[in-house]
Amino acid sequence: MENLSMKEMMEQTSFTAPKRNEVITGKVVMVKEDGIVVNIGGKADGILPMDEISNPENLPLEELYKVDDEIVVLVLKRDNGEGDVLLSSKRLRSRKDWELLEEKFNNKDTVTVKITEVVKGGLSAHYNDIRAFIPASHVDINFVRDLNQFVGEECEVEFLDFDRRRNQVVLSRKAVIEKDRKDELDEFWDELQVGQIREGVVRRFTSYGAFIDLGATDGLIHVSEIQWGKVNKPSDVLKANESLDFMVLDFNRDNNKISLSRKALTPDPWEVIDEMYQIGENYDGKIVSLTDFGAFVELEPGLEGLIHVSQISEDRIDQPKDVLSLGEEVVVRILDIDKDQKRIKLSMKQ
C-alpha cells in the first residue's frame, strides 16, 4: 500500500460525505464528454453527469467549465453505486428559478422567456430549464395562423397561472403587448395637438378618404383634405403603404377620432399665384375636363384655367374633344389671371 502523509490521512479520515439535497461548493478536476468530475473536499470526488448540468444553450462542456473552476452543486445521492457522490447543477438552478418565478408571480411581475417550439394549443417556452406554456390565444393581440414564426424568439410575458407543486407555468405574451399598447396610446394622446405634423402610413381607402396609421392609432384624411383641387378617388393621389407627413386638424380622444390633412401643409395656390405664374408665360398643364366651349387645364392641384375653343388652335375647331383628350399633357400660355373670381384664361396658340 502506498505510504500516506499524516496530512493526507487526516483529510481522508476527517472527510464526511455530504447529505442528500445539501448544497455544496466544489472544484472542477476533470471535464469529460459525458460530464465533469468535481472535488468536494479532501480526496472525495463527485460526479456531475451531462443530464444534470444546466446548459440551456447546449454548449460544449469544455466551454462551460474549466479545471479548477469553483462550482456550486446540489447533492442527489451520497453514493451513485460506484463510490462517487452524484451531483446536479441543473436541479439547483431549477430550484432557484422556481423560487424566482414564484416571487415574480406573487408580485405580478413580468418575466422574459425563450420560445422553443410549437405544441398542441400554443407554444412551449423556457425560463432557463423550466418549461412553460403560452396558449395560442395569448400569443398575440390578433389571431396568428402560423405560430412557427415565434420559435427562437425571446419575449416578455405575464403569468396566467403558476403551480410549483404541479410544475405548471402558463404565460401570456398578449397581455404585455396590450399593456404596452395602452401606455403607448396614452402617451400618444397626451402629446397630440391640433396643427401638429405627424408622420403616418396610408393603410386603407374608402370612398370618402383614407385611414392613416399614426403608430399608436389611426387617423382619417377626408378626400377634400388630400390636396388642393378636386380628387375623385383617394387612391388616385395616395398610395397604399406610403409614408407621408400629415397635419392634425382636429381630434376626439374619447371617440378615438383624428382628422388629418395633406392640403394644409401647402398654401392655397391662389394665394401665391403671383409668385408662381406670370401673364404671357408658357406653362405645362394637363387636360382635366372637356366642354363644348373649351377645355379646363390643371396647372397644379387646385389651380385650373380655361382654354376657350377659339384659343386651342389657329385652325377652326368645332369641338375641343376633336383635338384634345382627358389627361393629355399640354403647353399653355396665360392670357389673364382674375384672383377675385379665381379664373385663369389660357391659350394654346403660338
Image (cartoon, helix red, strand yellow):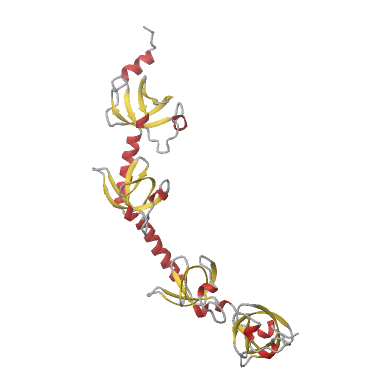
The residue nearer to you, when weighing 316 against 19, is 316
Q: Nearer the viewer, residue 202 or 199?
A: 202
**Image location of residue 1, percent across then percent down:** 36, 6
Q: Residue furthest left?
A: 165
Residue that lies at the very extreme toward the top in this rendered image: 1
Specify the quadrant of the image occupied by residue 268: bottom right
Identified at 45% across, 26% down, the residue is 68
Specify the quadrant that holds the C terminus.
bottom right
Q: In the image, is residue 299 above or below residue 142?
A: below
Total numbered labels: 0
Which one is nearer the viewer's eye here, 259 or 226?
Answer: 226
Looking at this view, name the residue that lies furthest to the right.
350
- The answer to which image quadrant residue 182 occupies is bottom left
Q: Residue at x 31, y 39 (%)?
A: 95
Indicate whether 272 appears above or below 152.
below
> Residue 293: where, in percent of width, then height?
62, 91
- Residue 178 % position (x, y): 37, 61
Taking 61 as reference, is 230 left or right? Answer: right
Q: Position of residue 20 (x, y in %)?
A: 27, 29
